Amino acid sequence: MTIAAPRPRGVIHHWAEILPLTPQTPRISLGEGDTPLVRSSHIEALCGLDELWFKLELCNPTGSFKDRGMVVAVAKALEDGAKAIMCASTGNTSASAAAYAAHTGIECFVLVPGGKVAAGKLAQAIAFGAQIIEVDGNFDDALNAARALTEKHPVALVNSVNPNRIAGQKTAAFEICEALGDAPDILAIPVGNAGNITAYWKGFGECSERGLASLHPRMCGFQAAGAAPIVLGKPVESPQTVATAIRIGNPASWKSAIAARDESNGLIEAVTDDEILEAYRLLASKEGIFVEPASAASVAGLIKLAREGRATGGRAAAILTGNGLKDPDTATTQYEPKVTKAAGTVEGVERALGW
Ligand SMILES: *Cc1c(COP(=O)(O)O)cnc(C)c1O
């Protein structure tokens, strides 16, 4: 047996052909992309589907899909001579921006809604050395401020309103088509600021142009009921949900999310926090996949459609956007720990287990 030289990894290396790169764009990477597509063992039947596949975007380097677009946004910012980047964030964008800033030696400013960011995400931004600004307001206020600040000051904005983020994120649609040999019939995805549903729809369109897919998936986006502006048709003043990553009242990519829905004959609907948490528990206990609550919205939506008699069968892919470790506080309230105390001996453990 011989051991091959390590192959270069990462979104920029692998997908250069479909990204807005020039010879001057630095080829940076933290090993993002190329995430597993795993077949469901249990939830598939609950959803009345022939096949359900989970795209494990939680396997990206900082634990969310944000890395896929961030690597391109930061590379392009570096190409343009930027010395600093800024984003507004419910947590994962800041973790990702801070990681790529640390990796490339630039400064990172993150604007987060005070007290509303999951502990793991804040820990990442702190560890990577970002300058954290806790805004007295919600995500939408933070994004408005970040947009205005980056117009005024020499700092690059790396939110998903930056088209390089969308370009990087569309690569996940290519990976799904490659893995399945075609596009799925249904794509289920959580919707917050709506950049990701926009990116996937763009990606699937390009896949069919390039002959990698013979069909378009129906784009099925799910918002949290307390933060469902697209479903309600109007901005939500103070969005509320346990799924903090999609706690957004006025999505920046609202129009393109609606276009993805309508052009694909899809839907954007709401799931309650109870439905999200049920899917969150099922993913862990029946599939062995620990996600953060926002990610469970995609699966909650598929379960809901089946319960309402609206399951269509066929093949679906659900995007699992972020890692459960990011939000330990929700985990400790949602799982019943099976813990027994025992003396540190064989007999002690046997006694405790009743063996
Ligand atoms: C950012 C994020 C979302 C929402 O994606 P949008 O592009 O804002 O719609 C969903 N889940 C997780 C874990 C996220 O980090």
Image (spheres, grey):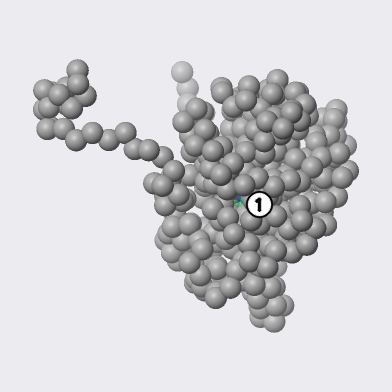
Q: Nearer the viewer, residue 314 or 209?
A: 314
Q: Does the image show residue 93?
A: no
Instruction: Tell me residue 92's x, y (percent).
Output: 55, 56
Residue drawn at the location 60% of the way across and 68% of the way down: 138
Mark 1 surroundings: few (<14), some (14-19) or many (≥20) residues within 10 A:
many
Instruction: Tell me residue 195's x, y (percent).
Output: 72, 54
Query: Is the residue at mark 1 in contact range of ligand 1, meaning its CB lies under 8 Å from it?
Result: no
Q: Nearer the viewer, residue 90 or 341?
A: 341
Is 254 on the left or on the right of 80, as rendered?
right
Q: Nearer the viewer, residue 342 or 16?
A: 342
Residue drawn at the location 53% of the way across and 42% of the way down: 277
Say what amino acid the circle numbered 1 marks.
Answer: Ala
Query: Judging from the image, what secondary structure is the residue with disc 1 in?
Result: loop
Instruction: Tell me residue 64's x, y (percent).
Output: 56, 48
Image quarter of the C terminus: top left
Residue drawn at the location 83% of the way across and 34% of the way down: 216
- Please give the count of numbered marks on the rendered protein: 1
Q: Nearer the viewer, residue 311 or 319?
A: 311
Rendered view: 257 above or below 288: below
Question: Looking at the image, which residue sits at the far bottom?
Answer: 152
Instruction: Tell me residue 297's x, y (percent).
Output: 62, 43
Rendered view: 45 above or below 28: above
Residue drawn at the location 55% of the way across and 74% of the way down: 135
Q: In the rendered image, which residue does mark 1 sit on?
A: 225
Q: Does the image show residue 290?
A: yes
